[in-house]
Amino acid sequence: MPPERLQYAELTESFSTMQSFPVGTTVTYVCRPGYMRIPGKSLNRTCGEDLRWSQTEEFCAARRCTHPGELENGIVHVTDLTFGSEATFSCHTGFRIRGNSEITCVVKNKGVDWDGVVPFCERVPCEPPPTIANGYYTEAAEYVYQTTVTYKCNDALKGEDPYSLVGTPSIFCTLDEDLNGVWSGPPPQCKVVKCENPKVQNGKKVTGFGPLYSYGHSVAFECDPGYFMIGQDVITCQENNTWYPPKPTCEEITEDRCGAPKISHGQVIPLQSEYRSGESVRLRCNPHCAFPDGAEEITVTCQGQNTWSSVQNCACKPVHSDSSPVISHGRVIYGQKPEYSVGDSVTIECYAGYTLHGSDRIVYMGEGKWSPEVPTCHLSAYVIAIICVITVVLVFLAAFWVYKKFFSQGGSYTVDENCKETCILKTNVPAEMEETEQMN
């Protein structure tokens, strides 16, 4: 019977057509395409008297493709480089593959090579940002992942009311669930916003004086002596031409009433417009804040005539942001802040001699996270090559110095065999001394 089929080799042509193999027949194999012979291994097998073919070690090994190379802004996944193996490619967040995402090591030109080229990763594009009435945005050369645009309103014509920018002034290109490029939110609007001049009976403005109140303008009030305030002392003009919160009122102080206690960096629980004498409320500090004695919450009681038993303000500790990106061998060159809000972006560069791996522009997503991930700076291949060359040169010079010092002295020398402790090298012996020694 013919020998079993081998994955890595096949019978030579002279044996491949044989139908019967008598005892003692020796067949010869040749490596299949994609494999090469292992030196020293036999290519022959013989049919024995037990009608079994002689066992043999594997004599062909799979050829290897060279590494496909690096993928900028992406990752190359390779577990093996032998014939038949595959290399797959994936891009970092915000980038997408252009080309084949997978290539295979195949037979090519009497050897093996990849059946495709390394693709490239391009930034995910966004459609041009939406236009707005009575306004414009800062244009960019292209609108791709992490591109930020900022909107501004047109100047009003002479005699017309100015426009106010209502909404978030900047939007940026980000990704949706399907990894397509979308803008982070709707654009702002440019609107004419006018709020009426607010007035409080038995009270007065302390800040925010002006004949015209537009979007975002604020006014602060205080009550006249003998009156206490019900409501918030600061109100702001909203986009719908109204004030929020509503204007406060100033009520006359009486024996049995108190207005809500005023507390900075904290809140009143429960919050009401007024309280009766003897009612108690809790004052709770905001996070990272506390009262002078360290407590985060106290209880106070209305004593009438708008007086509370013990009203204190909360003191807050500075909050240090741990969201600032840390780049080893690199730095933030644009957009650095002590604290970041969602949507803030920074631009990063590596120090001289280092190469950036990742995106040079990242956007803060909140909770200490950046998108895409904070890049890293690796020593550039050029610098590594220079270091290697310098190392090789230094090793060569050291070897040459050792050779010259100990193995290549000028002239000949002999060693006195009778010398046991100190050997005197006879180097460059003058000719007349040699002749004298010969005569003796």
Image (cartoon, grey):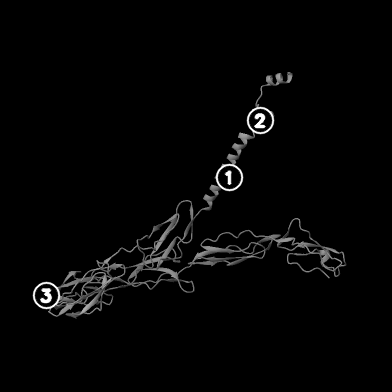
- Front residue of this view, candidates 351 and 49: 49
Q: Residues within 10 Å of mark 2 (few under 14, many from 20)?
A: few
Identify the secondary structure beneath mark 2.
loop
Q: Indicate whether 431 appears above or below 259.
A: above
Q: Position of residue 50 (x, y in %)?
A: 85, 68
Residue at 77 percent of width and 68 percent of height: 5
**Can the viewer see residue 168?**
yes
Q: Name the amino acid type tagged 1.
A: Val
Q: Which mark is residue 392?
A: 1
Q: Amino acid at mark 2?
A: Lys
Q: Which mark is residue 420?
A: 2
The answer to whether residue 209 shows anywhere in this view is no
Using the rendered view, name the quadrant where residue 214 is placed: bottom left
The reply, left or right, for residue 176 in relation to residue 42 is: left
Mark nearest the camera among 3 and 2 is 2
Q: Badge 3, how many Cα within 10 Å: few under 14, some, many 20+?
A: few
Dot placed on the residue nearer the N-terminal end, 1 or 2: 1
Is disc 3 in contact with disc 2, using a CB cutoff of under 8 Å?
A: no
Q: Is residue 327 above or below residue 422?
A: below
Q: Position of residue 325 (x, y in %)?
A: 41, 61
Horizontal and vertical percent for residue 10? 77, 65
Q: Is residue 286 shown left or right of residue 394? A: left
Q: Quadrant of the N terminus?
A: bottom right
Residue under label 3: 226
Looking at the image, is mark 3 or mark 2 earlier in the sequence?
3
